[in-house]
Amino acid sequence: MRSSKSRSRSKSNRSRSMGNILNRVFDSSGPEGKVRGTPQQIIDKYNQLARDAQLSNDRVAAENFQQHAEHYARLLSEAQREQEARREQQEAQARERQQQQAERREHQQNAQNAPKAEDTPKPETPPAAASDNDVLDVVEGGAGSGLVETPEAKPAPRKRSRKPSKPKETAAQPGDDVPQAPAAE
């Protein structure tokens, strides 16, 4: 049974990622049969075949072998360019991470070495000369003193105890097996 989706086998569906072409093994069908190996090995083999063809005065075969070698040379150089670009990108990201880590460490060291507000001594202000007009009224409890009341100074709130609730009386339903008191006459 075929699926309703049509499959396209065009080149546009293929990914353009080269992957690890440098070590990939290719099967090349050349004029003298198959040549198998990595791109560099195939290039070397076709160059050797081109030299042999030149020595035997076969210019057509020599050109054919050189074109095959050039094709694999282009594949190899493109893969090397991609690999170099990836390497530079990774190095740039690594440098950026190292710089961020160094900045974080520096910030942490600055935060640890910086004097805290609690540790720094506060400059003492000399008491002002009291004049006759400056009188502070100190009231018990601090209500009018202008001081802020803290939770430690407040008395603890009293807890109120609840009285237990009385159980509700339920009316006996007909059919209950509860004995009922006889009615008074």
Image (tube, rainbow, N blue to C red):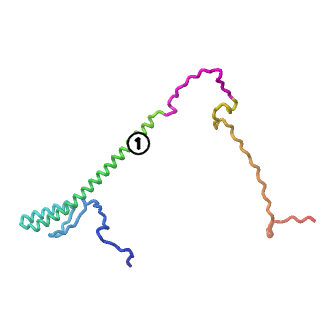
User: Is 68 left or right of 173, judged from the image as shown?
Assistant: left
Query: Residues in magenta?
Result: 116-138
| Residue 10 higher or lower than 117, as above or below | below
Which residue is nearer to you in this view: 180 or 96?
Answer: 96
Q: From the image, which quarter does the N terminus lie in?
A: bottom left
Residue 70 location, x and y as percent? Answer: 17, 62
Circle 1: residue type: Arg
Image point (33%, 46%), residue name = 95
User: Is 104 left or right of 39, judged from the image as shown?
Assistant: right
Which residue is nearer to you in this view: 45 or 148?
Answer: 148
**Most common SS among magenta residues:** loop
Give the residue pinned by disc 1. 104
Residue 60 location, x and y as percent? Answer: 10, 68
Image point (80%, 70%), residue name = 175
Which residue is nearer to you in this view: 168 or 179?
Answer: 168
> Could you say whether the residue bearing mark 1 is in a helix, strand or loop?
helix
Residue 16 falls in image quadrant: bottom left
